[in-house]
């Protein structure tokens, strides 16, 4: 029987990973260290903190990420891959055949609760470390905020979860019970609010990737938005966005050129609020994909069996696995939008022009994700080249918070006519790509979010919170009052007090 993740977590330590920090927060796992002999110094506390951060960008050994799983389940993408049986966990999300034995729920549950556990260990151990008081306060704040981020994903994805705020002793790990979702949200809000005062206003280059006050306000705004607390959500986003576009207290500004967001060298730019860091120096190979330092999306989204025919005209894509092909519906929507070219790799046109060939793999539409497509010019010079892409991923960026504030203001009943905050921030996103202003309506906000945030992991969650998923995803098999959440993994139900959710045939 597969071990319960809570049991596994009790054996994990926040100091499993030796860390290097070079201009950004990176994790460099090389060996394991026992918790009992750790947490003695400030440096060891920092190592433990970075191990908590590491879980944000966790990629499973089976190439699963939060982004590719929920993108596969959205109306923007298919799972793709070589065949209907290739990368089966993504296929199950795509077809809504996922169940409690599937790999996706197990991975997402493990990812979240491992992050929670590491944060809890650090919060317990750090109090006994003699170290600079302000540094200690900042580490505690970061650990609390990270714990809140993990819980935000867990409660949105699974709904009925345990709320664990301290390391669990082995004798009690199988007695953990679930709490009401409202209690989880309350703790998330508490953790984020308590974290704010000890966090820096801005992050210097040497600390890039760590949480700032602006990032925590953005997360808290999303937490309120998810709960339909429109006024508090708008207030949090207003703190992030500033008095006007480009006037954020935290220094955030939209990049003038949308395409520059996807330049792999343009990390931690002025639009980035919360970013997941990857590098090309990990030497990642097929035997150690779980080391997770290179971004596997570069190889996943590339067209399979890609061959340039007219080399001078062909993009230098790395032949990939054809994961997350873009649906024809989305392509038709974005085709004449200025964001099309930086977003969509149009293999259909390239092939028809005789410039390239590629395999028409599972669910092929001819349209792939340009934002993350691995290129010969961007892959690493060492290791298994296809697995060592250094492109970072945005968890939250400024255009996202502009659009969320406009939505929160509209839903709160605030004025949304020409010249109001909602109008100004919605249309700042459009103006960046040369589009004319539009009125502040939910239809316009929803369309703008879809076109602006393609393949950034937002669409599925947006459809669920807008209560549009049953309609928009019916063609994939989505069932109302069931697929808004994932089933709790069977391994968590075996020999524990955790109960399956009612949506999935349980009693919780």
Image (spheres, helix red, strand yellow):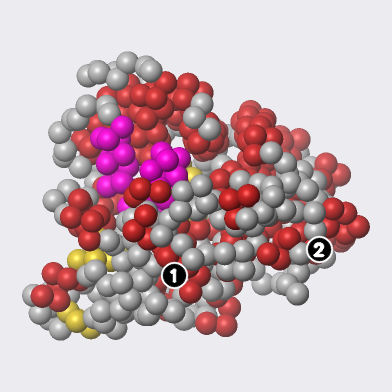
Tell me if residue 375 can be seen: no
Q: Residues within 10 Å of mark 2 (few under 14, many from 20)?
A: few
For the residue pair 11 and 294, the one nearer the viewer reads as: 11
Q: Is residue 76 left or right of residue 335?
A: right
- In this view, the residue farthest toward the top is 415
Instruction: Report if residue 32 lies within the magenta region.
Output: no
Circles 2 and 1: CB distance less than 8 Å? Answer: no
- The part of the chain drawn in magenta is 442-469
For the residue pair 48 and 304, the one nearer the viewer reads as: 304
Q: Is residue 271 left or right of residue 130?
A: left
Instruction: Report if residue 451 lies within the magenta region.
Output: yes
Closer to the N terminus: mark 2 or mark 1?
1
Where residue 351 appears, x then y in whole percent? Answer: 15, 76
- In this view, the residue farthest toward the left is 353
Where residue 235 appears, x then y in whole percent? Answer: 47, 23
Q: Can you identify the residue that label 1 sits on?
A: 91
The answer to which quarter of the image holds residue 95 is bottom left
Q: Can you identify the residue that label 2 sits on?
A: 495
Q: Main secondary structure of the magenta part?
A: helix
């Amino acid at each position: 029987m597969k071990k319960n993740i809570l049991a596994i977590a009790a054996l994990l330590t926040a100091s499993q990973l030796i860390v290097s920090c070079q201009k950004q927060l990176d994790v460099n796992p090389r060996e394991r260290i026992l918790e009992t002999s750790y947490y003695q110094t400030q440096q060891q506390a920092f190592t433990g903190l970075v191990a908590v951060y590491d879980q944000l960008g966790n990629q499973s050994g089976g190439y699963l990420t939060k982004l590719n799983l929920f993108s596969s389940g959205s109306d923007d993408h298919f799972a793709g891959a070589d065949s209907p049986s290739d990368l089966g966990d993504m296929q199950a999300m795509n077809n809504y055949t996922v169940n409690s034995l599937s790999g996706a729920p197990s991975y997402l549950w493990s990812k979240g609760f491992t992050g929670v556990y590491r944060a809890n260990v650090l919060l317990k151990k750090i109090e006994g470390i003699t170290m600079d008081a302000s540094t200690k306060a900042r580490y505690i704040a970061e650990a609390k905020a990270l714990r809140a981020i993990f819980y935000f994903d867990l409660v949105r994805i699974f709904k009925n979860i345990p709320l664990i705020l301290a390391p669990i002793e082995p004798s009690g790990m199988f007695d953990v019970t679930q709490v009401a979702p409202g209690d989880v949200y309350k703790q998330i809000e508490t953790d984020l609010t308590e974290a704010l005062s000890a966090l820096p206003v801005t992050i210097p280059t040497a600390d890039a990737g760590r949480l700032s006050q602006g990032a925590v306000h953005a997360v808290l705004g999303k937490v309120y938005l998810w709960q339909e607390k429109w006024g508090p959500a708008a207030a949090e986003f207003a703190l992030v966005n500033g008095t006007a576009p480009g006037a954020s207290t935290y220094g955030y500004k939209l990049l003038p050129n949308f395409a520059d967001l996807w330049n792999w060298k343009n990390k931690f730019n002025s639009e980035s609020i919360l970013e997941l860091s990857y590098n090309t120096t990990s030497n990642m190979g097929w035997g150690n994909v779980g080391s997770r330092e290179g971004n596997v999306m570069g190889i996943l989204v590339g067209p399979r069996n890609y061959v340039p025919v007219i080399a001078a005209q062909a993009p230098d894509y790395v032949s990939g696995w054809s994961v997350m092909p873009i649906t024809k519906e989305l392509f038709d929507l974005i085709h004449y939008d200025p964001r099309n070219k930086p977003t969509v790799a149009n293999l259909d046109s390239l092939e028809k022009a005789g410039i390239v060939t590629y395999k028409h793999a599972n669910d092929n539409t001819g349209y792939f994700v340009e934002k993350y497509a691995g290129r010969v010019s961007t892959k690493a010079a060492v290791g298994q080249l296809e697995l060592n892409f250094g492109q970072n991923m945005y968890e939250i960026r400024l255009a996202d918070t502009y659009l969320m504030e406009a939505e929160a203001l509209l839903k709160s009943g605030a004025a949304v006519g020409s010249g109001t905050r909602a109008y100004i921030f919605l249309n700042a996103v459009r103006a960046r790509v040369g589009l004319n202003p539009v009125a502040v309506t939910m239809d316009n906000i929803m369309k703008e979010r879809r076109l602006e945030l393609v393949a950034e992991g937002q669409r599925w969650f947006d459809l669920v919170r807008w209560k549009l998923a049953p309609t928009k995803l019916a063609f994939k098999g989505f069932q109302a009052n069931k697929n808004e959440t994932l089933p709790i993994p069977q391994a968590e139900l075996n020999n524990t007090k955790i109960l399956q959710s009612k949506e999935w045939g349980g009693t919780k």
